[in-house]
Image: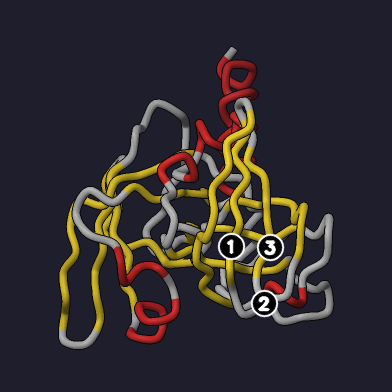
Amino acid sequence: MFTGIIESKGRVSEIVREGDNIHFTVESDISQELKIDQSVSHNGVCLTVVKQEDKSHTVTAILETLLKSNLGDWKVDDSVNLERAMKPDARLDGHFVQGHVDRTATCTDVREADGSWYFSFEFDPSEQNVLIEKGSICINGVSLTLVDVKDNKFSVAIIPYTYEHTNFKQFKKGTIVNLEFDVIGKYISTLFLKYLPQLQG
């Protein structure tokens, strides 16, 4: 479980394909503190550390992860948002994030607004994902508040600190990002769809 508060930005230093899997080596200032088998969020995807060195660590993405996320598009030198799992006695500054990406979205607009930035996104609405105005969304591992929600489109506002300390700084029109919808909304939507026919019948 994560919070969506990014600890560090990493740099993809090596990519190795092995069958359907891809091994990513990431250099970061928290890599030396990680341990084998530790869960770390990479752009919002919970991945297990399989190798650790002084300045880098390696994680493996399986085919299911690659199909649901933007990891298959990663290139050497790409910037990655990193967060270690939350501590049970720590403040929850973001929202509950599982590290289970639901789907990707495409950035449709980036607009600067007197010191902050508005990023707009669009995604495939084929699944029953719930978006609520001023609700929570996780984009590339970053916990954010939804604004201007319209079916399968939404925007988020980014303050200068977040802009500088995450890979939002590299986003442009056409950038593919990872989305994790609010877990509470997903449970409510699933239960509603499951039991609505019984209530109507």
Rounded to the nearest whole Å, what is the CA distance between mark 1 and mark 3? Answer: 6 Å
Which residue is rendered at x = 25% and y = 81% of the image?
116
Check the image and report above or below for 160 versus 58: below
The residue furthest top is 201
Label number found at residue 149: none
How many other residues sit within 10 Å of disc 3, few (<14), some (14-19) or many (≥20)? Answer: many
Q: From where the camera sits, is residue 188 visible?
A: no
The residue labelled by disc 3 is 57
Q: Say if mark 1 contacts mark 3, CB within 8 Å.
A: yes
Which residue is rendered at x = 55% and y = 56% of the image?
44
The residue labelled by disc 2 is 30
x and y, in percent, of residue 129 in the image:
47, 38
Front residue of 52/97: it is: 52
Labels 1, 2: front one: 1
Rounded to the nearest whole Å, what is the CA distance between mark 2 and mark 3? Answer: 9 Å
Front residue of 177/136: it is: 177
Rounded to the nearest whole Å, what is the CA distance between mark 1 and mark 2? Answer: 10 Å
The residue labelled by disc 1 is 26
Mark 1 and mark 3 lie on one chain; the one further toward the N terminus is: 1
On screen, residue 93 versus residue 143, left or right, reads right
Tell me the quadrant of the picture where the C terminus can be found. top right
Helix, strand or loop for disc 2: loop
Q: From where the camera sits, is residue 136 visible?
A: yes
Check the image and report above or below for 44 versus 56: above
Front residue of 165/121: it is: 165
x and y, in percent, of residue 177 in the image:
39, 50
Mark 2 and mark 3 lie on one chain; the one further toward the N terminus is: 2
Q: Amino acid at mark 2?
A: Ile
Tell me the quadrant of the picture where the N terminus can be found. bottom right
Which residue is rendered at x = 74% and y = 52% of the image?
48
